[in-house]
Amino acid sequence: MKKVLTFFITTVLFSSTIFANVSKGNSMHHYVIVNFTVKQNKISSFVEKMNELKAQLPKVNGCEEVSIYQDKSNTVSFTIVEKWKSPKEHQEHIENITNDGSLEAISSLLAKPMSGYGYNKL
């Protein structure tokens, strides 16, 4: 069951998140923008998880920056913007949080599957 759930969560994340590679000088950066709709009664738990993420993610190898936003008018809507050195380092992070159950813990707080969009930085 865990393998099926892990595959499902990883597939949802990668199929619904579009990655943007942006050229900056001699290096490529990998930007990830993910949107979450949280269950109304789980907002405080989700905010707690996001505060942990904000503190811990910059310590992960390859993560250069993370910003977390909550929609002012629709408080169940959140967006995370991450900046990574490379897609490979981001993928390794996703594998780690899938294997340790962190991604499953976040997914259990959601009203619907996470989705994402990619943008080129101008």
Image: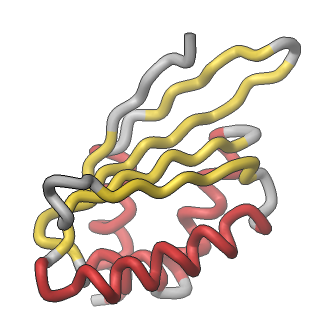
Q: Residue at coordinates 26% horizontally, 49% vertically from top-left?
A: 115
Number of marks in the rendered image? 0
Q: How is the image coloured?
A: secondary structure
Q: Nearer the viewer, residue 77 or 15?
A: 77
Instruction: Look at the picture and state if 115 lies above or below 98.
Output: above
In the rendered image, the residue lying farthest to the right is: 26
Q: State which quarter of the image contains the C terminus.
A: top right
Q: Residue at x 22, y 58 (%)?
A: 77
Residue 107: name its quadrant.
bottom left
Q: Quadrant of residue 24?
A: top right
Q: With respect to residue 85, does 94 lie above or below?
A: below
Quadrant (top left/top right/bottom left/bottom right) for the N terminus: bottom left
Which residue does the image show at 65% across and 59% down from the upper left? Answer: 92
> In x, y percent, where is residue 3?
37, 80
Q: Is residue 69 above or below residue 27?
A: below
Where does the image place residue 4, in percent across and percent down from the top left?
Answer: 29, 77
Q: Residue furthest front?
A: 72
Left or right: 106 in relation to 29: left
From the viewer's side, name the closer residue of 101 and 74.
Answer: 74
Q: Is residue 61 left or right of residue 80?
A: right
Residue at x-position 47% and y-position 33%: 19
Where residue 10 sits in the image (x, y, percent)?
38, 62
Residue 31 or 77: which is nearer the viewer? 77
